[in-house]
Image (spheres, rainbow, N blue to C red):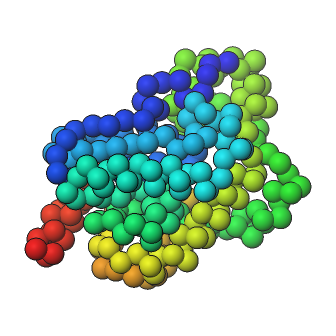
Amino acid sequence: MAEFYSGLEHQPFQLGQGPVGALLLHGFPGTPAEMRPLGEQLATAGWAVYGPLLPGFGSQIATLGQKTRHDWLAAAHDQWQKVQAAHETAVLIGFSMGGALALNLAAQVQPHFLVLLAPFWRFAGWQGKLLPIAKYFKKTLHPFADADFTDTAVRKQLSEVMPGADLDDPAVQAQIRQQVQLPTKTIDEVRQLGQSGGKLASAVHCPTLVLQGQNDAVVPPTLTRQLIARLGGPVAYREVPGDHTFPKMQPPNSYNIVPDILNFVTQQSHQNI
């Protein structure tokens, strides 16, 4: 079976240069690939952007069960210190689980600006209530156990993480069903990271932009509206066309969030002069 996350797009990236530096934190179980389109556009606009690979993700996926939210936060903090030291203006950007990570980090370091893209802070359904218990009884989840390999969305998702895999081969399908797994305790680490971010939101006092997909079923807009009410500083909030994938989609096939981010930072910078 083809290796997971073997493409160069899943590796950490550093693009562009300029006085504004931005740290882009990916989601779960993502890689820098989902932040690269945004990073490329911000670099073209004159920003320096950094997209780290969080511990246990991407090509390190086999070690994910050994990592905790503290490992992810420590790695993000180390990267943030480098960005902050190298740039006059430092912007922290987090997508989904990366949004939870950004909230936890922002409460500690107070970036110049915070941008949250469909920020995860709690599960919308029963998962959040069962995970603290389920992790002791069900060690792993197999997300593709019942997958329909003729489904376009399933094929697209798998082709992104397993380039070159023959998804029509019954042997490959069987391997994916059996071998693709996520440790339940790791998903609970994500839950706890989000819970912590929600609790710390009131300690985040920097100007914050929150962008949310109108049709997001993973992080519903209702939950994001609850989160922004907790933030301790000035907040700009916009619901944009799209689902949970909107931050990693490229125009013209999706809403372009780059002008929103650039305008927000520019306007807030002028207000603070």
In this view of the protein, which residue sits in the foreground, 90 or 163? 90
Q: Residue reaching furthest front?
A: 85
Q: Residue at x 83, y 64 (%)?
A: 133
Vertical comparison of 114 with 16: above or below: below
Residue 36 horizontal/vertical position (percent) = 36, 39
Vertical comparison of 219 with 64: above or below: below
User: In the figure, is residue 131 to the left or right of 150?
Assistant: right
**Which quarter of the rendering shows the N terminus?**
top right
Vertical comparison of 268 with 138: above or below: below
Residue 253 visible at all: no
Vertical comparison of 8 with 92: above or below: above
**To which quarter of the image does residue 205 belong?**
bottom left
**To which quarter of the image does residue 202 belong?**
bottom left
In this view of the protein, which residue sits in the foreground, 114 or 79? 79
Q: Residue at x 45, y 50 (%)?
A: 78
Residue 123 visible at all: yes
**To which quarter of the image does residue 142 belong?**
top right
Residue 6 horizontal/vertical position (percent) = 53, 24
Residue 265 horizontal/vertical position (percent) = 21, 63
Q: Residue at x 29, y 53 (%)?
A: 85
In this view of the protein, which residue sits in the foreground, 105 or 158? 105
**Which quarter of the rendering shows the C terminus?**
bottom left
